[in-house]
Image (cartoon, rainbow, N blue to C red):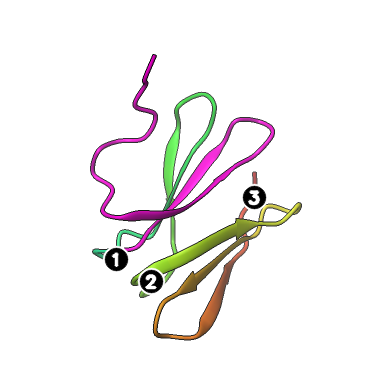
């Protein structure tokens, strides 16, 4: 059975990370939509990366820090986040 777990307003989602608690984090590579996080209870937030455009990679470390790489900028952006 197929289930929609994130809203359809994502534009070219590129990176995804799912943790042990069922929290889903997706980076959006177009339209400066940033990184969307949805926890197991269905609460959705957008992580406040500044001027994020064309994100091409996503990872989250054990402390909950989200790392995103954007194409063309050759930069890794860090956003500290609490879980």
Nearest the camera: 30 or 77? 30
Badges 1 and 2: C-beta atoms under 8 Å apart? yes
N-terminal-most mark, 2 or 3: 2
**Circle 1: is it few (<14), some (14-19), or many (20+) Cα within 10 Å?**
some
Which of the image's four quarters has the C terminus?
top right
- Residue at left 51%, top 64%? 57
- Is 60 above or below relative to 77? above
The secondary element bearing badge 2 is classed as loop
The residue that disc 2 covers is 52
Q: Position of residue 21 (x, y in %)?
A: 66, 31
Q: Is residue 83 left or right of residue 63?
A: left
- Residue at image location 34% in from the left, 26% down from the top: 4
Alpha-carbon span between mark 1 and mark 2: 6 Å
Q: Earlier in the sequence, mark 1 or mark 3?
A: 1
Task: Name the residue rendered at 36%, 75% in the picture.
Answer: 51
**In the rendered structure, are the residues bearing label 1 and label 3 in contact, judged by CB atoms less than 8 Å apart?**
no
Is 25 in the magenta?
A: yes
Q: Residue at x 45, y 49 (%)?
A: 26
Residue 61 lies, in percent from the top left, at: 71, 56
Q: Which mark is residue 82?
A: 3
Q: Nearer the viewer, mark 2 or mark 3?
A: 2
In the rendered image, residue 66, in percent from the top left (x then y), is placed at: 59, 59
Q: Residues within 10 Å of mark 2 (few under 14, many from 20)?
A: many
Q: From the viewer's perspective, tell me whether residue 78 is left or right of residue 49.
A: right
> Which range is magenta?
1-29
Task: Specify few, some or many for label 3: CA neighbours under 10 Å numbering under 14, 14-19, or 20 or more.
Answer: few
**What's the mark number on residue 59?**
none
In percent of width and height, residue 76 lies at 56, 77
Classify the position of the N terminus by image quarter.
top left
Q: Secondary structure at mark 1?
A: loop
Circle 1 residue:
32
């Amino acid at each position: 059975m197929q289930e929609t777990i994130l809203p359809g307003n994502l534009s070219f989602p590129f990176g995804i990370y799912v943790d042990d608690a069922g929290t889903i984090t997706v980076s959006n590579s177009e339209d400066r939509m940033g990184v969307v996080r949805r926890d197991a209870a269905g609460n959705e937030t957008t992580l406040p990366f500044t001027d994020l455009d064309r994100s091409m990679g996503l990872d989250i470390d054990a402390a909950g820090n989200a790392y995103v790489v954007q194409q063309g900028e050759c930069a890794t952006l860090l956003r500290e986040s609490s879980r």
